[in-house]
Image: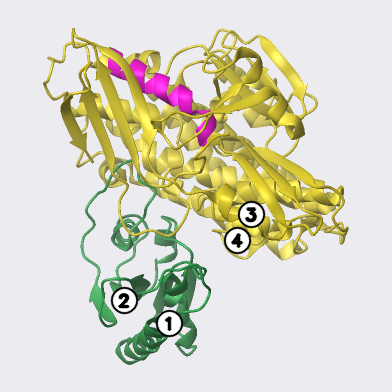
Amino acid sequence: MRSLFISCGNTLRCDDGVAHRVLELLPAAAEREVRSVHQLTPELAAEMAGFDVVVFVDADAASLRPAVEPIGAWAPRSPLTHVTEPAEIVALARALFGFTGEALMCRIPARDFRFDDDLSEVGIESAQMAADELRKSI
Amino acid sequence: MIQPVTRIEGHAKISIHLNDAGEVESAQFHITEFRGFEKLCEGRPFAEMPGLMSRVCGICPVSHILASSKAGDMLLGVEIPPAAEKQRRLVNYAQILQSHALSFFHLSAPDLLLGMDAPPAKRNIFGLLENHADFLRRGIRLRQFGQRVIELVGGKSVHPACSGPGGVHARFTTAQRDEILSWIPEAMGSVTMALDRLKPLLDGFREEIACMGNFPSLFLATVSRQGGLEFYDGVIKIIDGAGNVVTESLDPARYYTYLGEASEDSSFVKFPFYRPLGYPGGYYRVGPLARLNVARFAGTERADRELREFKQRGDGAVCEAFHYHLARLIEMLHSVERIEELMSDPALFEESIHARAALNRREGIGSCEAPRGTLFHHYWVDANGLMTRANLLIATGQNSQAMNLSVGQTARHFFKGVALGARPDEGILNRVEAAIRCYDPCLSCSTHAFGQMPLVVEWLARDGTVLGQMAR
């Protein structure tokens, strides 16, 4: 099963970059590709074709524990926004680039968003838990 | 002193002021967030500035890195090696390409292809899927190309480490060249396709072209020393709405002698102006429309052909903000041509990529053309090279007054016939937004975010009573 993991976040804002740590903790595997980005951009849709499963990994200030869930349908937002969401990328990948796989969202508990390139204790613990969970389930 | 002065991210508001007769008297586009990049860099070593300033924007970090690097070059007192200059030019073309692709295909194409009155639920890129899937696919791939070039040169597409004071960080390789060249035919085909789609559509937008930011103004942009289209280094030229040259051959490093900066209580954005005409009369426009208006030629075959045709749309200068869209496409065409040219330039591959020097000056200024217009970074440092002060003049800010006037003109025209206190229909409000969208202001692009940028439109009576409000 070919899988693509896309981590998103700012490593200079403490736990905002926790998703990148999760991908570092995942062991390398022949059928697994990883992509670390600062922010989600529409062209990621073009990279998803051919994968059986794509997992977006991101920090979440509201989560209590790492959670992996299917990405639902995208609801259009403001036409002025420059924000791109995972559901939008998945929808574009399905409609334009032939992506037929499963799309998942992995939310990592994050509490500290100060200017710092280290993770908080919550971030470190969450990253390990999320990596363990992803290794087992995907 | 302008206080507070900052770049902005995320939140905007439009106020439309009505007179006693219910007619639009004035309108304002408010940028309501404070960020303060000038302040937070104080005390940092100047060599850190390109990395720090990159964080101003997630869409055009390269522009900030380049302006910052050039300010650093001036602090060092060096001329960078040819390979470094070529590499900086390469990433700047890629930056222009990817940012314009986002603006055109994602943000404005729904209006252009589906119409200003299309249902809001359809007026987005998903609305384009039904009948314009290939158009959208090509747009995404075009931006992917620009981002990929930046990633190849700088290690990552957002906030790349591609340049610093004195030069660039890594040599350009033939493997990078080969990958970039493999994209060129598709990129060229996609920009050509977009131009072929847009131009016939313009006939259907005559009212919008005439009434959404159509007024004479000054236009300011960098040009080459020969007067051609230039994004990286050159001189500043200003023309008026009739196409007359107001001034040319201005040194970007002396911008403060001819550009002033005003502030308004209604917005955190600056209101720069051309000093000889004062404020607010000396407002000017920057960005693709301004660049094509001030440049005498593009310097590449296809873009020159399009530029000649573009100039026929105006009498001296093209004053309709709506034509920012067309100008953006022509600049994308030019960028693809220039990227291809650079791939066969031996200087790009030379070994020397960095000029080494200690601090030689206490004040440095760098400028370049960002996707949205001319960008200036101005730094002051102490004897140890630590920043004591910074001033940033960002493209979106330089279009502030023009955006206000465009919103006002659009509202004045399209609000006619709307009863006092009544809610204007969705298509009218969309036209007010679309007037802003012509300028592609960069409000919500600095950092990773997970949410939406709200836009609130209010219409107010003379006494300030809010007669109505609509939020997205």
Instruction: Let me know if residue B306 appears in the view.
Output: no
Labels 2 and 1: the sequence-earlier one: 1
- Locate residue B350 relative to residue A8 in the image: left or right: right
Mark 2 or 3: the one toward you = 3
Specify the label residue B151 is tagged with. Answer: 4
Mark 2: few/some/many CA within 10 Å (<14, 14-19, 20+): many
Residues shaded magenta = B396-412
Mark 1: few/some/many CA within 10 Å (<14, 14-19, 20+): many
Report, in whole angstroms, how far the alpha carbon at label 1 lies from the one at label 4: 22 Å
Mark 3 or 1: the one toward you = 3
Mark 4: few/some/many CA within 10 Å (<14, 14-19, 20+): some
Colour in which chain B is drawn: yellow
Circle 4: element type: helix
Find residue A99 and report its image quarter. Answer: bottom left
Asked if labels 1 and 4 share a chain, the reply is no
Mark 3: few/some/many CA within 10 Å (<14, 14-19, 20+): some
Asked if labels 2 and 4 share a chain, the reply is no
The chain letter for the residue carrying disc 4 is: B
Circle 1: element type: helix
The chain letter for the residue carrying disc 1 is: A
Asked if labels 2 and 1 share a chain, the reply is yes
Q: Label 1 is placed on what type of residue?
A: Val
Report, in whole angstroms, how far the alpha carbon at label 2 lies from the one at label 1: 10 Å
Q: Which residue is mark 2?
A: A106
Circle 2: element type: strand
